[in-house]
Amino acid sequence: MARQTTRWFRAQAIGFVERPVPDDEDSGAFFDPSVEVALEILPRWEGALAGIEEYSHLVVIVWLDRARRSRVARPIHPERRPDLPEVGLFATRSPNRPNPLGISTPRLLRRERTTLWVHGIDAWPGTPILDIKGYSPRDELHPDATVPAWLEALWAIHDAERGKTT
Amino acid sequence: MARQTTRWFRAQAIGFVERPVPDDEDSGAFFDPSVEVALEILPRWEGALAGIEEYSHLVVIVWLDRARRSRVARPIHPERRPDLPEVGLFATRSPNRPNPLGISTPRLLRRERTTLWVHGIDAWPGTPILDIKGYSPRDELHPDATVPAWLEALWAIHDAERGKTT
């Protein structure tokens, strides 16, 4: 049952991530989850957004178009931190993946026609959006989910660097 | 800040959804979440899977290659049920979307080299996989998420049709 060949598919932008304030695109800057971000959907898809505002959260799939596409499967240090163990890129959220797809599940604040205002999406302005779904607890909520020890260590590092007390 | 043009991107299959038992591809059959499904990743990406087995759950993005791609934004009845209100396709999980992308967050049972055995992925055999990530509660867990009333009604219908007592 092996299918060994790579197959290719054409994905289209249905909209773009925008921010009301120009961003300096400093990829080293901390992501601020309290910033309101606009998902600007193309006008032709306005009818496809009807009722999306009845969800509290969205699932947003973006194409990380400024990522360097990975062509090799070499293990990496997450966030290039040598103190973290090397793991495969699928075990990380590195944007440099075979397909530079990003997932976010932001809170939806409000809809204004084809603009979805959300909290908590970590993507540069102009990032193409490929799909929007409503966040479904029956499908996406796993309270019992566990993660590798290195990821918990990374979260603690992030919290400390942000000055957050945990 | 409007970007009105559609842009296109090329996505590649990194593997395929497989099932140990041939499936009759009856799309009307109920999805059985207890069936073990194999995610067969292409051998070239084996190194990229290192450490993925330390996650209890995955985020899997698939290309629903047998879906009829939506070119119009007309509201639809979810699952073609006339008793449910018409909503935009982004408010539904219909596979007939501008980009036929599917998301699953299955439990990972075990890894055997490039085979990931999971529970709870509702996709036909041969469905191309575009990306795999570890499920991260910090990013994907929203216990306070709420959904439209029609979706709660649909869940109740599904439960009743499956003979599940709720």
Image (cartoon, coloured by chain):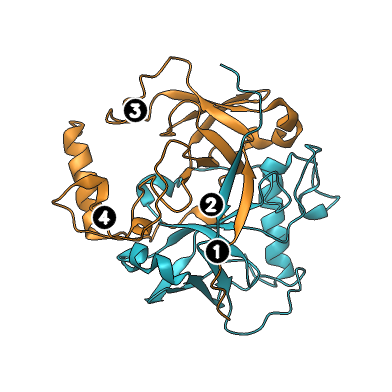
Chain colours: A cyan, B orange
Which residue in the rendered view is the most extreme toward the right?
Answer: A82
Label located before the other in sequence (3 or 2): 3
Using the rendered image, report if marks 4 and 3 lie on a common chain. Answer: yes
Mark number displayed over residue B32: 3
Secondary structure of the residue carrying numbered label 3:
loop
* Amino acid at dot 4: Ile
Viewer can see residue B166 = no
Q: How busy is the neighbourhood of tag 3: few (under 14 within 10 Å), some, or many (20 plus)?
A: few
Secondary structure of the residue carrying numbered label 2:
helix
The residue closer to the viewer here, A166 or B8, is B8
Which residue in the rendered view is the most extreme toward the left?
Answer: B83
Label located before the other in sequence (2 or 4): 4
The N terminus of chain A: image quadrant:
top right
- Work out how far the residue at label 4 is from the one at label 3, CA to CA, in angstroms: 26 Å
Tag in front: 4 or 3: 4
Secondary structure of the residue carrying numbered label 1:
loop
Residue at x 53% of width, y 39% of height: B57
Label located before the other in sequence (1 or 2): 1
Mark number displayed over residue B137: 2
Residue B130, percent across and down?
59, 41
* Amino acid at dot 1: Thr
Label located before the other in sequence (1 or 4): 1
Residue named by callout 4? B76
